[in-house]
Amino acid sequence: MPPRISLTQYLVEKQREKGLIPAELRLLLEVIARACKRIGYAVSRGAIDGVLGEAGSSNVQGEAQKKLDVIANEALLEANEWGGNLAAMASEEMDHPYTIPNRYPKGEFLLLFDPLDGSSNIDVNVSIGTIFSVLRLPEGVAEPQEAHFLQPGTKQLAAGYAVYGPSTLLVLTVGDGVACFTLDKEIGSWWLTVERMSVPEQTREFAINASNARHWHAPVKRYVDELLAGREGPRGVDFNMRWVASMVADVHRILTRGGVFMYPRDNREPDKPGKLRLLYEANPMSFLVEQAGGAATNGHQRIMEIVPAKLHERVAVFLGSKAEVERVTAYHRS
Ligand code: P6P
């Protein structure tokens, strides 16, 4: 058995051989990975440590926070505030960006995260995860403001997620493909277990919350109806459906074996562009999927080219196997 490569070695090699990431970014990614270990441990303790259930508070989205949402958010803040790599952080769980306290040095990066995605699955023991995205603070900015986070996804330096499932995995891109690391809980190391994840261009599997079907716009209804018609319909083959309701789990399945993930805007709230957040859910996942050979649009354009107007902006999401994303996007144009 060849020696396993650790996350640290993988990042040092990206830094040294490809000059892809400066040492400060490598250090930041290692701190994030360490925080994810801590979050995964808290998640695994569940009822034993009394961390299930509601926190009794709500977040900027007006959603009731779970205790573990708050624990995960605090774990990422505490792990990242002192290292000197970051200028500020933004989280689904905080109304406004968190500026690094003056007692610590500020760095050149901005970190955005959904500390615990899929919270509705926490209390029923279904996989959940942490999603993160790294941007560079614009040149010459001394005091980071919300506006400095409003960069298109193409500006991301790195993105990834941890999935707390049967295994605890870390999936990461720094712009040179997508790697998957598995946590060895005995010694606390992240071992490289998939060097280059790849999304098959074709798929027979789709993911959408079908309970919203009566609210979908026509292009989505046409696309999904054709999938449901299977071999008797225009597609001529049968399709399978999965919906975990944890974006991290659904995206990991797609990065592993292909598929198309959809969370479209619909008529429930016509003014709402979608449910998922652009900056710390759709953009990092789009970066990963594109780096793995897939595609990601909002039905009309590449998600990573959208210039955000607000920190907690929402967006429609169609991502995964390129042939299917291109088809459902084409239906929006016709
Ligand atoms: P629904 C979890 O709350 C989340 O933000 C994503 O992780 C997931 O894909 C989606 O919402 C599930 O939404 O409406 O099916 O519960």
Image (spheres, grey):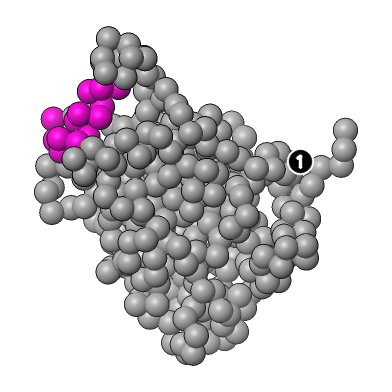
Mark 1 and ligand 1: say if the CB distance to the nearest ligand atom is below 8 Å. no
Check the image and name the residue furthest to the front: 334
Residue type at the position of mark 1? Glu
Q: Residue at x 27, y 46 (%)?
A: 299
Magenta stretch, main secondary structure, is helix
Neighbour class for label 1 at 10 Å: few (<14), some, many (≥20)? few
Residue 140 position within the rendered picture, expressed as x and y whole percent measured from the top left: 49, 90
Q: Give the side of residue 136 with respect to residue 212, left or right.
A: right
Nearest the eye: 85 or 61? 85
Q: Give the side of residue 285 with respect to residue 270, left or right.
A: right
Residue 163 position within the rendered picture, expressed as x and y whole percent measured from the top left: 54, 42
Q: Mark 1 points at which residue?
A: 186
Where, by quadrant of the figure, is residue 239 drawn?
top left
Q: Which residue is drawn at 61% across and 50% down?
A: 177
Q: Which quarter of the figure is the N terminus placed in? A: top right
Compared with 21, 42 (above or below) is above
Compared with 247, 283 (above or below) is below
Residue 295 in view in this figure: yes
Nearest the eye: 326 or 131? 326
Q: Does the magenta-highlighted stretch encompass residue 217?
A: yes
Residue 292 position within the rendered picture, expressed as x and y whole percent measured from the top left: 55, 44
Where, by quadrant of the figure, is residue 279 drawn?
bottom left
Residue 248 in view in this figure: no
The range drawn in magenta is 214-227
Compared with 24, 200 (above or below) is above
Q: Which quarter of the figure is the C terminus placed in? A: top left
Residue 262 position within the rendered picture, expressed as x and y whole percent measured from the top left: 32, 38
Nearest the eye: 304 or 25? 304
Callout 1 secondary element: loop
Compared with 310, 185 (above or below) is above
Q: Does the magenta-highlighted stretch encompass residue 50?
A: no
Where, by quadrant of the figure, is residue 45 drawn?
top right
